[in-house]
Amino acid sequence: MASTRKEVIAIASKFIGAKQGDSKHRQIVDTFNKIKPRGEIGNYSCAWCAMFVTAVQSMAGNGSAVVPQSYNCGTLISEAMRLGIWQENDNYTPKQADMIIYYWDAPAGNCNYGASHVGIVSAVDNGDITVIEG
């Protein structure tokens, strides 16, 4: 059963402070590896931001029919497009529990580059976006 946005944030919040190699990080990777989206398997030494959002959404009961799942930010974008939920619009205001994908070196304006990081929006207040990241 899919969960509410607040439930997603409650689960994501439990991982605040996780560091690569600690028990919270291992739980994220192990959860991701139970899902194995498109056969993908993560390990404890690779980048884990996309595994984090995938694992959190899975823990919340949200599967690949609802949210994109991958260990790769670019694949998350492709899957979001396939699901019809992708927004590439600087005027879009994200909602709590939305995935937000970054390209750190992009100039201002809509991004037409690759993606390098992803997190889960925990709050939006007067245009300020707070994100929980893995």
Image (tube, rainbow, N blue to C red):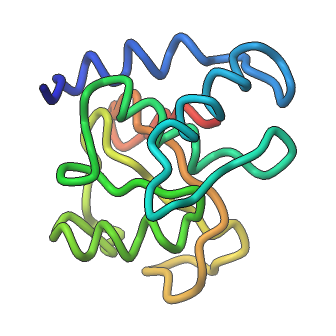
Q: Quadrant of residue 76?
A: bottom left
Residue 24, position as x, y percentages in the image: 69, 16
In the image, what residue occupies the spot 41% across and 54% down? 69
Of the pair 56 and 5, the residue shown nearer to us: 56
Query: Relative to 14, is 19 above or below?
Result: below
**Left or right: residue 15 compared with residue 53:** right
In the image, what residue occupies the spot 19% across and 49% down? 66
Quarter of the image with the C terminus in it: top right
Of the pair 30 and 25, the residue shown nearer to us: 30
**Left or right: residue 59 compared with residue 82:** right
* Count of marks placed on residues: 0
Of the pair 90 and 74, the residue shown nearer to us: 74
Query: Relative to 9, is 125 above or below?
Result: below
Residue 2, position as x, y percentages in the image: 15, 30
Residue 44, position as x, y percentages in the image: 81, 38
Query: Relative to 115, is 97 above or below?
Result: above
Q: Residue furthest bottom?
A: 112
In the image, what residue occupies the spot 76% across and 13% down? 23
Residue 126, position as x, y percentages in the image: 32, 36
**Left or right: residue 1 compared with residue 119:** left
Quarter of the image with the N terminus in it: top left
In the image, what residue occupies the spot 57% across and 40% down? 33
**Left or right: residue 63 compared with residue 28:** left
